[in-house]
Image (tube, grey):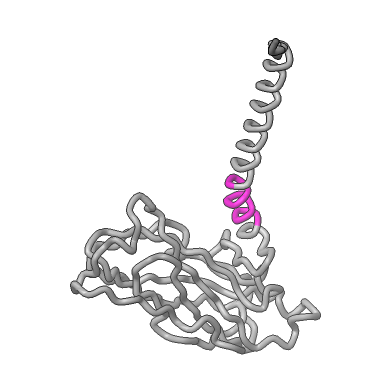
Amino acid sequence: MTRQTVTDPTKKNTNRVVAGVCIAFFGGMIGMAYAAVPLYAMFCQATGYGGTVKRATQQYADRVLDRDITIRFDANTVDVPWQFQPVARSITIKIGETAEAHFSATNKFSRPITGRATFNVQPELAGPYFNKVECFCFTDTTLKPGETLDMPVVFYVDPDIVNAPELKDLKTITLSYTMFPVDKTKPVASSVPADGRRNKISDTEASLGG
């Protein structure tokens, strides 16, 4: 005679509950991870932590020092079929002086592409002292096929930077942008460049040194 195993319905329901709790916990952790990214970015932009530039609350510094500092510019792309680069590689300004620099972006693909720029400065300790008054990175940018856009950034270096012992002899700051895609509904690789050729868009050099 074959013995039949009787399944305990209570134990079966308990297993289902445990599995449901585990799935919900895992999903919640993923959601928290995604939410942490913009929150961390907001924290960095407000404090200058990790080399992230601060958004200025005023257009001018309270004073301009008779001391020069060179600002170098770097531009990179990640999964955005744009030619993205600084118009000038560097400028030299007075500490505390409000200055304007320009970047250029050209959409090389046959459909509109929306991008969003992240940014930071090197050395990282200079982040809290680098203030942006206006910047293309504050909003998303959409380019039509083949369209080229001038993208200005207005900024100044807080004169208090000379009071920081680690930065008192600093002569060069590198401002770096990385452009990311916003619309991910269609893979960029499946699109066709505006000139009909499938060319890889080269980034500008990853570091300008200094």
Q: Which of 183 and 117 is in front in this view?
A: 183
Residue at position x 35%, y 76% in the image: 201
Q: Where is residue 89 in the image (x, y as percent from the top left)?
A: 46, 86
Residue at position x 55%, y 83% in the image: 207
Residue at position x 60%, y 67% in the image: 53
- Decide if residue 125 is on the left or right side of residue 110: right
Q: Give the magenta range.
A: 34-43
Q: Where is residue 146 in the image (x, y as percent from the top left)?
A: 23, 69
Which quadrant of the structure image shows residue 198? bottom left
Q: In the current view of this chain or complex, which residue is farthest to the right?
A: 165
Q: Does the magenta stretch include residue 119?
A: no
Q: Is residue 41 magenta?
A: yes
Residue at position x 41%, y 59% in the image: 181
- Decide if residue 12 is on the left or right side of residue 113: right
Q: Where is residue 81 in the image (x, y as percent from the top left)?
A: 34, 68
Which quadrant of the structure image shows residue 127? bottom right
Q: Position of residue 152 (x, y in %)?
A: 40, 71
